[in-house]
Amino acid sequence: MQCPVVQSLDKPFSTVLTFRSLLQLTGRDVPAFLQGLITQDIHRLDQQPLLYTLFLTPQGRFFAEAFIFRRDDVYYLDIPAQDKDRLLSYLPRYSLRRDVVVQALAGGEVLASDGPMPDGDVVALDPRCAAMGYRGYRLHQVCGGQGEGPEQLYRQRLVALGLPEGQWGLVVDKTLPLEANMDVYQGFAWDKGCYIGQELSVRTHRQGVIRKRYLPFWHPQEAGPELPEAMGTVMVSMAQGGGVLGLARVRLEHLDAAMKSFGVFVPKTLANLVGV
């Protein structure tokens, strides 16, 4: 039987992501303001419609993640709904004496589909990976979610790619972005200028030494794998295929053992990085 981790790549999804929210930023200083905070280059929006980026702590660890797009000189952040209040408090701290207004968007929806292009005011390919299909945004109209089923398929696709999203796999103040594959999935612009928390990620990228990576696993027991601490840590999991599907942060020196004994799987997008 085909491993459920691989099977989840073949199950199409088309859904409203009810666990995502939208912020809008207005004012003439928004591009410069964001440029000093995010790991991507805001000026790339001149060439592509959607960016994926991170906000880091001053120590270089994960703080938040977002998709960014622009429409009619208004910038929008697609963020996890549970991060909305935290970012509404965080962002204004850096906008003193700047023409920047940050507020939650009243209404609006985030859509995702790997099949037909979703119907929205803004629609673009997911910049992280072609396998994630399209991402769409309704900025005013709200049609409501489509239930847990389609959203679950979306999460399964993320896991099968070794791709954490928001606090579902990413831990504020603890996660190192390159261990979480954010370099592979287009979260960084390595040629941009300074931003908060850049030193650790840039140094690690230049040295090319990453000893742990987030990798998917499927385990046939509902309790999931009990990874030895020296081998890795389970970051997130869900019931799937009569067992447990999830992401683990795996020490690469123990990758062979993790694959043989605990169902760890290396997606093609990460194969070159982990040497398989």
Image (cartoon, rainbow, N blue to C red):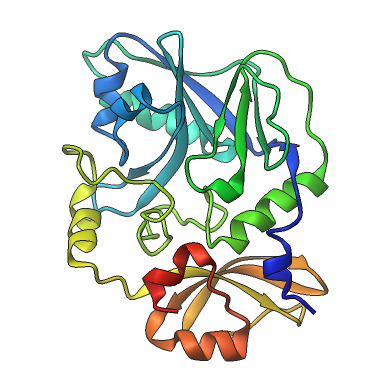
Tell me where residue 15 appears, x and y as whole percent.
74, 37
For the point 59% across and 36% down, the residue is: 81
The image shows residue 3, relative to residue 157, as above or below, that is below
Relative to residue 115, is residue 254 depicted above or below?
A: below
Instruction: Give x and y (percent) for residue 42.
Output: 31, 28
Residue at image point 18% right, 61% down: 206
Quarter of the rendering containing residue 184: bottom left
- The count of marks equals 0
Viewer-closest of 141 and 80 = 141
Tell whether 56 sits left or right of 69.
Answer: left
Q: Compared with residue 38, is residue 241 higher up or lower down, i.e. above or below?
A: below
Q: Is residue 199 above or below residue 94?
A: below
Nearer to the camera, 110 or 269: 269
Q: Is residue 32 left or right of residue 174?
A: left
- Horizontal side of 97 relative to 56 (left or right) equals left
The C terminus sits in image quarter: bottom left
Looking at the image, can residue 75 be seen? yes
Asked if one can make out residue 229 in the rendered structure from this viewpoint, the answer is no
Query: Which quarter of the rendering shows the N terminus?
Result: bottom right
Q: Residue at x 73, y 65 (%)?
A: 7
Give the percent coordinates (x, y) of residue 242: 83, 74
The residue lying at 78 percent from left, 33 percent from top is 145
Image spot of residue 51 (x, y percent):
42, 34
